[in-house]
Image (spheres, grey):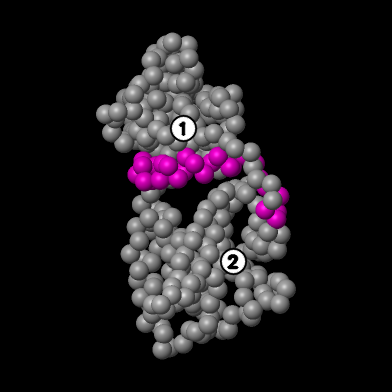
Amino acid sequence: MAIPTANNMPGILNRLGKMTAIRNAELLEQSLLKTLCPLLGVFDSILCRFESDTVLRVVDHHRSKTVTEFGEQYEDRISESINLGLPAPVDAIVRSVRLLGTVSIQREGEGFLMAYPLHVGPELCGCFVFERERTPSDLEDGIIRGVLEVFSNYYQLLDASRRDRLTGLLNRQALEDNFDKIAMLPMQRDGEAPAGGGKRAAPQSCWVGVIDIDHFKKINDQHGHVIGDEVLLLVSRLMVSALRGGDQIFRYGGEEFVCLMATADFEGARQAMERLRGTVERHVFPRVGQVTISIGFARVDPFSLPGVVIANADRALYHSKEQGRNSAHCYELLVEQGIFKQIESGGLELF
């Protein structure tokens, strides 16, 4: 391994420059691993992201080397998983960082397993884990901390651009940019494999809910936009409180939200949507009293365009409105009952 020195600092700065040219949060995570691994002379590393108290997202990096007639060639392979379990030593060191918020180093065989905490602002949001024959030198330690700090500060800027300013929820742009990835990953969120890999979670299906605040224009007209904004903020927080770990909700625009959640079947999805609806219905809003929401939801078909799935859920939402509001209806069930005809995917825009 080429130990970092003043002579190769231009190369390190060049890598940081390329990393901060990225405009996608997920690609930025991958770039972090591709930046640090060659500097440390390691081929395997992981980036653990703490999505919630119960959800762990893992970006797994493996760098393979082949020797060709043109010299040494490197290939980076990166995979991502949620709650599928980690090898016992890795799980232990990640738990240590999560509890203490500091660097953790543990002896592993003839080498060392190391984990550095990752902060976004004051919040501990993950850790960088790698294994090596020796512990980092003072210079290497400083470089690791510096690169992680640059990453965290830039990630925070990217994350802010993906969030709605009023509610703090991910915004429509974040949903549009990552719909396929977000919708497929929750398939493994409900079950967590034991530490050590092994058994995987049972396959799950993903469901999209389109949610609209009932009579929101009336709230604005009667109480003003300041109270209207307060209602939007409270509704968003109530819905977040009703979500399970790993489910996500976005502000889609105005008084409309989109929820992505994983569950095994229709009944699980129905109960989850009813939980959202009931949580809002039971809350007493200052100055306004009761506020309700209407929901339409549809199953994510991996062979359908995102726009088709959103359109299906949106049709079910309007059926909820037509049936008196404050209710949740499933698109597939409405098709099965003959209330809707299956719409074709052709001709629909992506969003």
Task: Please identify the quarter of the rendering in which residue 254 is found.
Answer: top left
Q: Residues within 10 Å of mark 1 (few under 14, many from 20)?
A: many
Mark 2 touches mark 1? (CB < 8 Å): no
Whether residue 177 appears in magenta in the rendering, the answer is yes
Of labels 2 and 1, earlier in sequence is 2
Residue 129's tag is: 2
Mark carried by residue 300 = 1
The amino acid pointed to by label 1 is: Val
Q: Which residue lies furthest to the front in this view?
A: 69
Closer to the eye: label 2 or 1: 1
Q: Nearer the viewer, residue 242 or 306?
A: 306
Extent of the magenta region: 171-197
Relative height, residue 83 to residue 139 (above, below): above
Q: Give the image quarter of residue 125.
A: bottom right
User: Is residue 307 within the magenta segment?
Assistant: no
Please determine whether, in this image, residue 36 is positioned above or below residue 335: below
Camera-nearest residue between 219 and 266: 266
Secondary element at tag 1: loop
Crowdedness of circle 2 by 10 Å Cα count: few (<14), some, many (20+)? many
Whole-angstrom CA distance, mark 2 to mark 1, is 33 Å
Horizontal and vertical percent for residue 318? 38, 19
Q: Where is residue 114 in the image (x, y as percent from the top left)?
A: 63, 71
Secondary structure mostly seen in the magenta stretch: helix
Placement of the C terminus among the 4 image quadrants: top left
Q: Which SS class for mark 2?
A: strand
Relative horizontal placement of residue 60, taking residue 334 as reference (left or right)? right
Q: Position of residue 172 (x, y in %)?
A: 36, 41
